[in-house]
Amino acid sequence: MKLTLSSSPHQRVRRDTGQVMRLVIYAMIPGMLAQSVFFGWGMLVQAAIAVTSAIIFEGVVLHLRNRPVERTLTDYSAILTGLLIAISIPPTLPWWMTVTGVFFAIVVAKQLYGGLGFNIFNPAMIAYVVLLISFPAAMSLWLPPASYSSVPIDLLDSISLIFTGFTTSGYDVTQLKTIADGVTMATPLDTLKTDLTQGMTYSESLNQPIFSGGLFDAAGAGWGMVSLAYLVGGLFLWRTKVISWHIPGGMIASVILCASLLHIADADYFASPLFHLFNGAVIVGAFFIATDPVSASTTPKGRIIFGAAIGFWVVIIRTFGGYPDAVAFAVIIMNMAVPLIDYYTRPRVYGKNVSQKARGNSQ
């Protein structure tokens, strides 16, 4: 039997930045395909716009900073940022808004801080928040799932909507949100928040068309399957050791705990844990956004706290805040708290306390 000795650190999986970013992109493919199936081709068109813009903006800024352009662009971080923005915004968002969001992500949130490794905020979430605050109406115009749409939307229609605001047949986004029975369909999170303000109970809101045929009767049609597809990709990242379990585990457990406590307190007003998990961006946020290695906590205990706090803020803002979804706000809030979390969760240096105790005894 032959033994092999090696010095620490005993890291068996060695990947450079480009390899890690590519694996994350590969893991996003199931979710992106699910989004395209349920909500049309617009997301893929947005991905092309966002990725192209991200590469151009990053290349220009790197050139102006006299930094190596080709080497930095091949780390795939700009491409990943573009894709994260594309899956977060409505598929029919006007192209210039997408470009504006990418500009803030790459130029302001990333490069002005010094580039990859120096940004304190998640660039994709900065882009989302900037767009949401600047263009709230446009950012709320999600189309209904394809199975509910009264007007089929093909690739040309998606391109036309994004660049002109109308389909090739002359329909705008507002008209396309009206499903076959004449009901204007909103997202599950928007629907619940609106219904609660109108005096309906949580159970009564689940009878709305958007929840018909939904996963577990709590996830909106299409939205639950998209979340499951991203969950598959997230588990792939965990299985291949691209990410650890700490942040997604802490975030998902916190969402379940906080939502459960509220739901037990008043089931007529507060949504169930399953509703929070499979509607909106909780699963995407847990595995693909909060786990950003640059802007997240770096210690094992800190990652759990970081993820759990994001989950807490997601439920609180969704329930009591003015915005239906809250993943972007929760991530940015906790990005600001990362230095404090890391400071108080630093691992103890081996032998430090022992040496201090020994010096005390010698005195």
Image (spheres, rainbow, N blue to C red):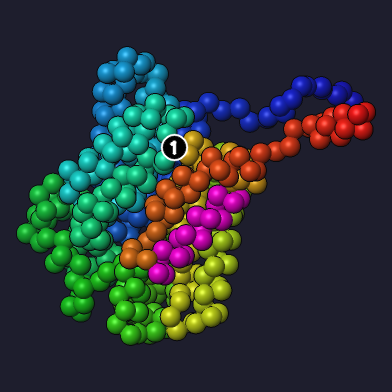
The residue at which mark 1 appears reads as 120
Q: Is 312 within the magenta? A: yes
The N terminus - image quarter = top right
Going 13% across and 50% down the picture, which residue do you hit? 160
Q: Secondary structure at mark 1?
A: loop
Going 25% across and 61% down the picture, which residue do you hit? 140
Q: Is residue 337 above or below residue 219?
A: above
Give the residue type that dot 1 points to: Ile
Going 23% across and 68% down the picture, which residue do you hit? 149
Q: Is residue 228 above or below residue 292?
A: below
- Along the line of sight, which residue is nearer the eye, 179 or 5? 5
Residue range (magenta) = 304-320
The secondary structure making up most of the magenta span is helix
Q: Quadrant of residue 256?
A: bottom right
Q: Is residue 5 above or below residue 44?
A: above
Question: Seen in the image, is 27 located left or right of residue 341?
Answer: left
Q: Position of residue 248 (x, y in %)?
A: 55, 52
- Along the line of sight, which residue is nearer the eye, 151 or 303? 303
- Along the line of sight, which residue is nearer the eye, 355 or 243? 355
Q: Position of residue 204 (x, y in %)?
A: 38, 85
Most distant residue in the front direction: 363
Q: Position of residue 108 (x, y in %)?
A: 31, 34
Q: Is 142 within the magenta? A: no
